[in-house]
Image (tube, grey):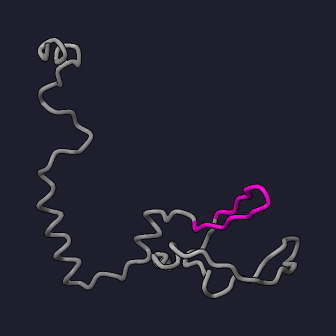
């Protein structure tokens, strides 16, 4: 669902005319195909007289949901690969040797 925006679309500056209509209590517009979003949510903001629409950043859950399901063989290979990583220390654990204070480093440099 969330496809990257083509680089060509990001570089160019396009202008198009579209229609404004009422949708319930909200005003809505038709977005032409060349401006189409490939996401479920957009952010809207006003900059002076200009209204800007931009895709919301994708969450990790959305990115994972967009991936195709693994086959049984791929899932087993993934499990074996992850089992090899179990002996690595967690990233949030400090090193065995504490870092030297910055003041001591400056004194040695003089």
Nearer to us in this view, 3 or 33: 33
Q: Residue reaching furthest bottom? A: 33
Residue at 45 percent of width and 66 percent of height: 61
Q: Main secondary structure of the magenta part?
A: strand
Q: Position of residue 33 (x, y in %)?
A: 63, 88
Picture layout, residue 49 above or below residue 80: above
Picture layout, residue 50 above or below residue 22: above
Task: Give the quarter of the image for residue 12.
Answer: bottom right
Number of marks drawn: 0
Q: Is residue 74 left or right of residue 53?
A: left
Q: Position of residue 109 (x, y in %)?
A: 13, 17
Q: Position of residue 83 (x, y in %)?
A: 14, 62
Residue at 15 percent of width and 67 percent of height: 81
Residue at 16 percent of width and 33 percent of height: 95
Nearer to us in this view, 92 or 35: 35
The C terminus - image quarter: top left
Please state the extent of the stretch shown in magenta in the rendering: 43-55
Nearer to us in this view, 50 or 28: 50
Q: Is residue 58 left or right of residue 35?
A: left
Q: Is residue 62 left or right of residue 107?
A: right
Q: Is residue 49 left or right of residue 62?
A: right
Residue at 22 percent of width and 45 percent of height: 90
């Amino acid at each position: 669902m969330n496809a990257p925006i083509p680089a060509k679309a990001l570089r160019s500056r396009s202008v198009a005319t579209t229609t404004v209509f009422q949708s319930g209590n909200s005003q809505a517009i038709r977005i032409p195909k060349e401006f189409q979003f490939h996401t479920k949510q957009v952010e809207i903001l006003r900059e002076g007289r200009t209204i800007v629409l931009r895709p919301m950043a994708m969450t990790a859950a959305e990115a994972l949901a967009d991936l195709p399901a693994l086959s049984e063989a791929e899932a087993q290979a993934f499990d074996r690969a992850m089992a090899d990583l179990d002996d690595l220390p967690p990233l949030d654990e400090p090193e065995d040797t504490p870092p030297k204070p910055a003041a001591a480093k400056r004194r040695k440099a003089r």
